[in-house]
Amino acid sequence: MSTGHVLLGLLVERPKHGYELKKEHDHRLAGAKPLAYGQVYATLQRLERDGYAEVAETQQEGGPERTVYAITDSGRAELAQWLNTVEPPAPYVASSLFARVAVAGKAADGYLARQREAHLARMRELTAAKASGAPAQVLAADYALQHLDADLRWIETAISRLKEEKDA
């Protein structure tokens, strides 16, 4: 994920300050890692440097001064290009789950059983969270659930293949 592109997408609606962008990011990308304030402000400075965002105004409403940023025409063009670029499927298996099983080989049975239980527990948590979640949270939970489901199917395949290898 490109934090800069996400922030540009949030600026399309109207100019916003960093605190507001951080809150909106964390709400709209409910299942993603929350942004650190320092990351938001560093990214805004890069967007400004690159001509994708500009300072619209500074506000002082009883607290610290807040710099409000707006997206520029160049920022809109950059965002449109990013939104229309197809994300290539991952070319490599980059999963610590896969790496552990590949290294453990025939001895991975116990690990796979424990991992299956951890996945099932997380799936129960996500399913419960969907019941009362906002649309963004439900979408995030659906995304995570489908990835966990794919992992579970692979875990079952791995257990079966390792059993076949032991029996051979």
Image (cartoon, rainbow, N blue to C red):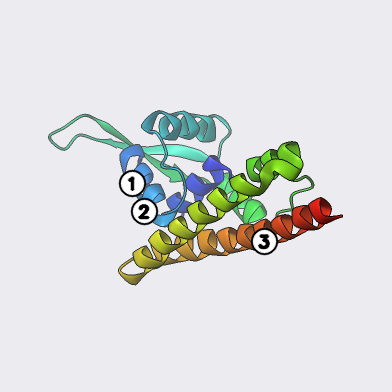
The residue at 58%/33% (across/down) is 50
Q: What residue type is labelled 1?
A: Lys
**Circle 2 or circle 3, nearest the eye:** 3
Q: Is mark 3 on a helix, strand or loop?
A: helix
Residue contact between numbered discs 1 and 2, judged by CB atoms under 8 Å = yes
Front residue of 137 and 55: 137
Image coordinates for residue 19, horizontal then vertical, percent: 31, 39
- Tell me if residue 3 can be seen: yes
Per the image, the residue denoted by label 1 is 23
The residue at 67%/53% (across/down) is 81
Front residue of 99 and 69: 99
Residue contact between numbered discs 1 and 3, judged by CB atoms under 8 Å = no
Q: What element carries label 2?
A: helix
Q: Which amino acid does label 2 sit on?
A: His
The residue at 44%/50% (across/down) is 11
The residue at 41%/56% (across/down) is 28
Per the image, the residue denoted by label 3 is 156
CA distance for labels 2 and 3: 34 Å
Image coordinates for residue 20, horizontal then vertical, percent: 32, 45
Q: Left or right of 89: which side holds 62? A: left
Q: Left or right of 130: which side holds 43? A: right
Per the image, the residue denoted by label 2 is 27
**For residue 71, which numbered disc appears in the image?**
none
